[in-house]
Image (cartoon, rainbow, N blue to C red):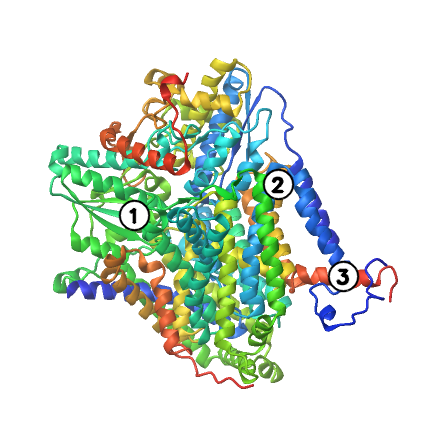
Amino acid sequence: MKLKHTALIGAAVAGLLATGHAAAQEQFIGLPSYRVGPFGANGASLYGGWIDYMAMINARDGGINGVKLTWEECETEYNNARGVECYERLKTKGATGNTVFQPLSTGITYSVLEKVAQDKIPMVTIGYGRTDAADGRVFPWVFPMISTYWTQASAIINYLGTKEGGIDKLKGKKIGLLYHDSAYGKESHAILDKLAAKHGFTVEKIAVANPGNEQQAQWLQIRQMKPDYVILWGWGVMNPTALRTAAKTGYSRDKIVGVWWSGSEEDTIPAGDAAKGYTAAGFNVAGTNYPVVQEIQKHVYAKNAGNMADKDRVGSVLYNRGVVHGIITVEAIRKAQEKYGKGKPVTGEQARWGFENLDIDNARLTQLGAAGFMPDLKITCADHEGAGKVKFQQWDGTKWKVVTDWIQGDQSVVRPMIEESAAAYAKEKGITPRDCSKES
Amino acid sequence: MLYREAGQFKVSYQEDQQIFPIRQDRVGFIAILGFFFLAVPLVASEYWLQAILIPVLIFSLAAIGLNILTGYAGQLSLGSAAFMAVGAFGAYNFMLRVDGMPFLVALAIGGLCAAVVGVAFGLPSLRIKGFYLAVATLAAQFFIVWALVKFPWFSNNSSSGVISAQQIEILGFAFDTPVSKYLLTLGIVAVLALAAKNLVRSTTGRSWMAVRDMDVAAEVIGIRPMFAKLSAFAVSSFYCGVAGALYAYAYLGTVEPEGFNLDLSFKILFMIIIGGVGSIMGSFLGAAFIVLLPIFLNVAMHALFAGSMPAGLGSNLELIIFGGLIIFFLIVEPHGLARLWQIGKEKLRLWPFPH
Amino acid sequence: MGFFFEVLIGGLLSGVLYSLVALGFVLIYKASGVFNFAQGAMVFFAALTFVGFQEVLPGWTGLDADSNVVFWLAFVLALAAMIVLGILTEKVVLRPLVNQPHITLFMATIGLTFLVEGIAQALWGANVRGLSLGIADEPVEWIMESADILVSKFDLFAATLAGALVASLALFFQYTKVGRALRAVADDHQAALSIGIPLQHIWAIVWAVAGFVALVAGLIWGARSGVQFALTFTALKALPVLILGGFTSVPGAIVGGLIIGASEKLAEVYIGPFVGGGIEGWFPYVLALGFLLIRPEGLFGERHIDRV
């Protein structure tokens, strides 16, 4: 028994020490994924889409200017300590080390927030993570791209405004906020309070305790309050339960608007018919009818090389979100290669420059086959968010249908809040914000 | 041959009662300390320090805390992670709100906060026993995490409820490299572990064990069960609290209340069961085992089946093997790694002679 | 006042579902003294196996996916899987651990939790699936019209099903030979062995019955919120019910469930707003704790007297 353990530990040591065996002309991307645990279903689709996109780039284009993409997954189980271990393990792999760290977990994001700056590895958090990191002057290494939670909240209010026929019509309306009672759910409070004051509506906040598989009390309260709309700020099992309980208590689903973590097939399918008519925000849309997804099917799935165990999930919201992660990662590396040498793998520091100067306009999106699939975005030194807009999709009982064009968040409200919060962080940590006029 | 106590005579009670009565143990202990204090910082890579050694040390400390409560005083608790959270948030708030607060004092205060909360949630132990108490400690687990999320004061009004630990500085020296953080953690853990080792040999420790073995009988011979149980809760929570503060300051840097969830509590419980209930040494072995096993499985899976297995299956296999190994281990050695250590020592005493 | 009753009734109906999960704990604890933390994972495993079979059966047999035959075939196959799982658990995990301290057994069942979760997802994949029992989750109209109180049809159905299950289990334990043997085992293992009751047989049967209860719970909970990993969390809802009702009492599990369900909903609605809400996570535990402080033996437990 003892001997066996020694042998096991010995093998583990050997395995842990064996790093850095990649050949040149390869760009290594570490994937801190989660495929088990409460959010395993989400992780499988997200990382599946991301890996498939990179596989497609390798198969179709032979990599980025000839530099093949390589990757390795590391299971985090959505657990902070495991995430830190994965970060440290992946950090030095590949010829130039890990190019970018994207943990898909806000908890892990916070846990490595300070490490990435020391190790010079950019961290990209698309649609989660630390909101005020959008102020790139204080957080040079962190990129909460496309849209932050606060922008999203503001975009949802703008969407409700258009539904009412003008943002000023929201005056006197009552909006319910059903939120996951956690750090994630609380992100919604400050911004909605501010918007409520600006536009003259009221917000009724209703907390749902984790995991949220029981919401009878909350929806009976909503039935009493009779809000004009309910914003669903949920995660995991809380979402289908909310939709079903809404149906049970007779609250119309067309008046519920979800955030992007509440707007995937994983949230609506379990709710069955109760989800019909429900609308949710998203910085990417569902569907396989976009050229980029079809390219993946042609170059990857046609050769039986796809990452998804269940091929029917290709084109789901979360899968496509993974593709967005792939597009942004690849485009940033491409951008960095333009500056630091085409056909050569870039380091984390060079990749950071690529992310910071990322400019995917609509023409480029069309070339990528992703027009309408994700918003155009332009990152700058000061603004690490880039796009700040979302589309809304409605569940028709079997699939998501896009019902709006891109809707902008109100940056005149959001940006000052981000800057204020980032400045407070800079003060607490003794960071001098960068002067963006001096960055190249 | 080497490990023989023949010829080591004890001529006073003091000698008989010392913490390591056998000379080889003393030498071994100093050698181990020397190894971890001197050799490891020189050879270990940043990965080993940051991703393995620091968390193992911190979890060992939490496991010692739980071991004091469960292993020595016999009170099963499922709320250790919550007490860690109290320690982390306590230390953070004292560092934040008191100017010039020395780090070590804040660490101790964090531990004391946890101790106070621990005593409060330990009160039911006076009337409730066994699994009823275990489930009751879940009240602490859920309530504390809820309160830390709910009241923004605890996290200095951070919009997302996370706290970002301040820089560790002792007497002007900044602990910001992995090596210095490791040494600091090791120092604190070593001192506290020695203190625990001594504590469980003291009157207090013996009263805990009496209460564990039979509380009515203990009461009959003059031990106050209330004092024994509550002091066990206090000391245990203090250890967990310090571990939690180190978890925030020396390991993660930034923590959210949900990081201290029920899973973490179970993990610490696993550590003491696998390591050995009622053993300080076992707490270290158990922590190392539980931290390393999943990492080892993950690395092994990738090394063996990289690319040849459907995505997701590997992660599930890791989970299956982890669960299976725990069960296997409990069946073959229910007394934990500490017991194996003890058996090893017994064998070493006789080696190389059979008798 | 209508609102109060609405919350109360909703809470009582939810409480029945907590009882259903708690029942699985009670059965096993009663017979073998094991606090089986894997009950939540078993609920997940059962529901996932059921929908998994529902998905693959039409392909294997050529039957229509929505037909009743497929439903019942899947049910029978899932039940068989649960019985096999239960018997294997008893044989492989618990029998070698006989006479170990309770905490070791408890930890073994946590190990079992990981094992069962891993096996379930390795077999059927991690996808989130819907599950329909053919009963719409909508208000009963005549109650709505006559009293303006909202009572869900589905909840009523689930509560009836759970009630029927408990009643039949009670009858089973009261009047069958196996049931009598089980009660004897629960009273005293060694005495039961000495009068010739096959202890291991009984344990296997109890684990199989617990598997059956897990399947029913899994179907109902799965229909409420989808078949996904979160089903394992149902165990956390059952634990306060257990300490309130007692680990060994079937009626305790039922009454405890009703009390917990009703009080947590009332607390969330009437106390929640004053402290920021979301108190459902811990309130049942604190309630049960407070109750135990006054009455340590639980609702239906016997007063325990310590002797030296």
Q: Nearer the viewer, mark 2 or mark 1?
A: 2
On the question of residue A421 being in view, the answer is yes
Secondary structure under the numbered disc 1 in the rendered image: strand
Q: In whole angstroms, how far apart are the C-alphas of marks 2 and 3?
A: 28 Å
Secondary structure under the numbered disc 3 in the rendered image: helix
Is there one chain holding both mark 2 and mark 3? yes
Residue carrying label 3: B345
Q: In whole angstroms, how far apart are the C-alphas of marks 2 and 1?
A: 39 Å
Residue carrying label 1: A179
Q: Residue at x 32, y 47 (%)?
A: A239
Callout 1 crowding tier (Cα within 10 Å): few <14, some 14–19, many ≥20? many
Image height of C204 relative to A163, above or below? below
The amino acid type, in three-letter code, at marker 2 is: Trp
Residue carrying label 2: B48
Q: Nearer the viewer, residue C303 or B119?
A: B119
Q: Tell me the number on the disc at residue B163.
A: none
Callout 3 crowding tier (Cα within 10 Å): few <14, some 14–19, many ≥20? few
Q: First in sequence, mark 2 or 3: give its number.
A: 2
Q: Nearer the viewer, mark 1 or mark 3?
A: 3
Residue C239 in the image, given as x and y percentages of width and height: 42, 65
The amino acid type, in three-letter code, at marker 3 is: Lys
Q: Nearer the viewer, residue B23 or A283?
A: B23
Residue A365 in the image, given as x and y percentages of width and height: 36, 19
Q: Is residue B15 left or right of residue C90?
A: right
